[in-house]
Image (tube, rainbow, N blue to C red):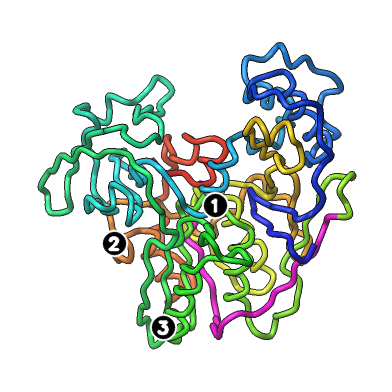
Amino acid sequence: MNNAKWIFGLMILLIWSCSPKDEIIPDPQSDKVRGAIFESMEEWYYWNTELPTSINSANYSSNEEFLNAITFKPLDRFSYLTTQDAFNNAFVGKNAGHGFGFAFDAAERLYLTFVYDESPAGKDGWQRGWEIIEINGKAISAYKNASGGYDFQLGTSDPGITNSFTFKLPDGTTSTRTNVKAEYQSNSVLHKEVIDLDGKKVGYWVYQSFKATAGQSPTKSLEVDESMKFFEDAGINELIIDLRYNGGGSVAVAEQINNYLIQLSNTGKLMYTNKLNSLKTSLQRSVNFKKAGSLNLDKLIFITSRGSASASELVINCLEPYFDITLVGDNTYGKPVGSFPLSSYNDILKQNNVELVPITFATANSEGKAEYFDGFPADFAVGDSPQFNWGDPNDLRFAAVLHVLQNGSVGGRLLNTFYRPKWEMIDQFKGLQQEFPAY
């Protein structure tokens, strides 16, 4: 397994291919395809013993409905279907859409939370902190539904779809922008800087998703390499990692980051172990830290939220036994399990361009911690304030982190800002898009 590429939500195993199945029928929604889905789940699904003993695939109108009927509901919120191209593109940042995220503040005002540099929104100059007051000529309140959530009706991510947004800018002026969805390359690093704080150099790194750089072998991110070199050159002592909108991604990139962050004294020690179902125990493995770079950190602080999921949680879990880690913001999402695509092992799925990505493994840190389906609790619960740009001391969660670094705690004024919004972007997406949530 030395050549395996693992991804949280992705693990490509370079092992044998399955024997050819029966004659392939080029009909993705056929009963034969649903049979292949069930057969693959019996072999690879982490909870394969919980699958129904019998099921009639003809009773379901789509592959998605069929998969939903057979997954282990108490714990599996994550298994999904997609296409092979969509899956492969997502993990190297090949996106389509407007290229932004948004969130509500405590007063239920809607703000841009991040904007990808090369996206249609990024090329039009949009920035975190812009308030959205209208979408397609309608006030934000018009999109609220009876349950208290929102349906913004922005359409699919297909290129060519147009939406109009009216913004209130930080200087008080308004601007209406029409934006056309298009294909673009997304960036993972949204912001990085070095802060002088009480004689210490503190790095601040806003990391939005664990994406590899296309063409890199072994799978890794050049953005991560460049960021860590930036912090090494600055000689930082402590690092703030902002994962508040990071839905996950590549385990290989998570390992890359962990190897930069770990202390030299802990190189060679256990990072994590994984566990597969009883049919695949021979594929289980342990991963040890292998120190990269020259960072020598005294402390790590993470800014987290319900939007921090999957590989974000893996990084926190793996480093927790070796660092004094503090979480500021809100509890994380709760995804201690991962997936890899199965079409490589089933010709019917492959030839019909059906990519099945079910939960196939769980991970545990060096202390055996593996069951965090409720997420990691924040040490200091502080409200989000998306109206402020990255590194602005008025950003409540960023300000709280600075308090922790200076005083070891957060004062009551900041703790009193905590709120949980009724609508959160990560909950508006399913499957592949939930791992990389963006409009």
Query: Separation of disc 3 and disc 2 at Cα?
Result: 20 Å
Q: Are marks 1 and 3 in contact (CB under 8 Å)?
A: no
Residue at 58%, 75% in the rendered image: 261
Residue beneath disc 2? 394
Q: Which mark is residue 201?
A: 3
Residue at 59%, 56% in the rendered image: 250
Residue beneath disc 1? 91
* Circle 1 SS class: loop
| Residue 43: image location, x then y, percent | 83, 38
* Circle 3 SS class: strand
| Residue 52: image location, x then y, percent | 82, 24
Residue at 27%, 28% in the rendered image: 141
> Which amino acid, by three-letter code, is at mark 1?
Phe
| Residue 296: image location, x then y, percent | 56, 84
Disc number lying in front (1 or 3) = 1
> Which amino acid, by three-letter code, is at mark 2?
Asn
Disc number lying in front (2 or 1) = 1
* Circle 2 SS class: loop
As for residue 97 lying within the magenta part, the answer is no
> Which amino acid, by three-letter code, is at mark 3?
Lys
